Amino acid sequence: MLAAIILAAGASERMGQPKALLRFRGVTFLEAVLEASRAAGLDRRIVVVGPDGDKVLSNIELAGITTLRNPDPATGPIGSIKLAVTEVLNHPVEGAVVWHVDRPHIAVATIQALLDRFGRGDVAIVAPEYRGRRGHPVLFGRGVFQELLDASGGEGARAVVRADPSRVAFVPVNDPAVVEDVDTPEAYRDLLRNIDRSDASPPPPVSPRS
């Protein structure tokens, strides 16, 4: 079983409102991430919210989704990751994709590429790479769960990724979203403008079958 750990506990200070509730293609960021993770084949989905998470949880249908509350978001993403890893530690979860809620535009194909690479069984961590830039989400195998639990608040999950390069695979993807954070109003406007342009573009021509 593979899981999605969706991080939605941040204070969203630069955005000025909860990023989980921003709209993207007619749904909230959180709903977009949940649907993409389901479509990619992630069996279990865990959402970590902050102390004021009631606003998020009361506005989104989360039936069948595990929800956790991080009482101290100041610990950074690693605090939320630790809560979610602890939740799945005694369950048959072989790996978890750590997905920040401010990346609702990650392509399903990108997640499937990570899962396919992880399925080969020779690495513990898989991350996407776009034009030579390493990005997110990152898939952590069960073999490094304890390291995530032991990680400090400073480096967090990055220290686990950097600890042993031989166990990490970077998968090239044609998805700029893996290197884009939507964490400011300006970035959000850019996202919506780019989506509007892509929606207005004509579909590519279909090649005749031979």
Image: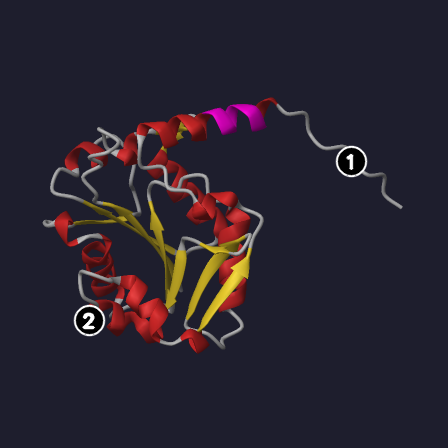
Instruction: Identify the image quadrant of the N terminus.
Output: bottom left
In this rendering, position of residue 10 left or right of residue 129: left
* Residue 97 in which image quadrant: bottom left
User: Where residue 27 appears, x then y in whole percent?
Assistant: 39, 29
Q: Is residue 92 visible?
A: no
User: Residue 206: which numbered mark, if any?
Assistant: 1
Asked if residue 191 lies left or right of residue 69, the reply is right
**Residue at screen point 43% across, 53% down:** 135
The CA span between labels 1 and 2 is 51 Å
Q: Is residue 180 above or below residue 151?
A: above
* Residue 110 horizontal/vertical position (percent): 52, 51
Identify the residue position indicated by label 2 in the image.
Answer: 150
Residue lying at 21% horizontally and 54% vertically, measured from the top left: 80
> Residue drawn at (57%, 28%), measured in percent from left and top?
198
- Residue at the image point whose x is 21% and y is 45% from the top: 9
Q: What kind of element bears circle 1?
A: loop
Q: Tell me which secondary structure the magenta stretch mostly adopts.
A: helix
Q: Counting other residues with Cα less than 10 Å from the Cα at mark 1, is it few (<14), some (14-19), or many (20 or more)?
A: few
Q: Nearer the viewer, mark 1 or mark 2?
A: 2
The magenta-colored residue range is 193-198
Which amino acid type is shown beneath numbered disc 1? Val
Is residue 23 found inside the magenta-colored segment of the image? no
Amino acid type, callout 2: Asp
Residue 174 picture location, percent across and down: 58, 48
Q: Please tell me whether mark 2 sits on a helix, a strand or a loop.
A: helix
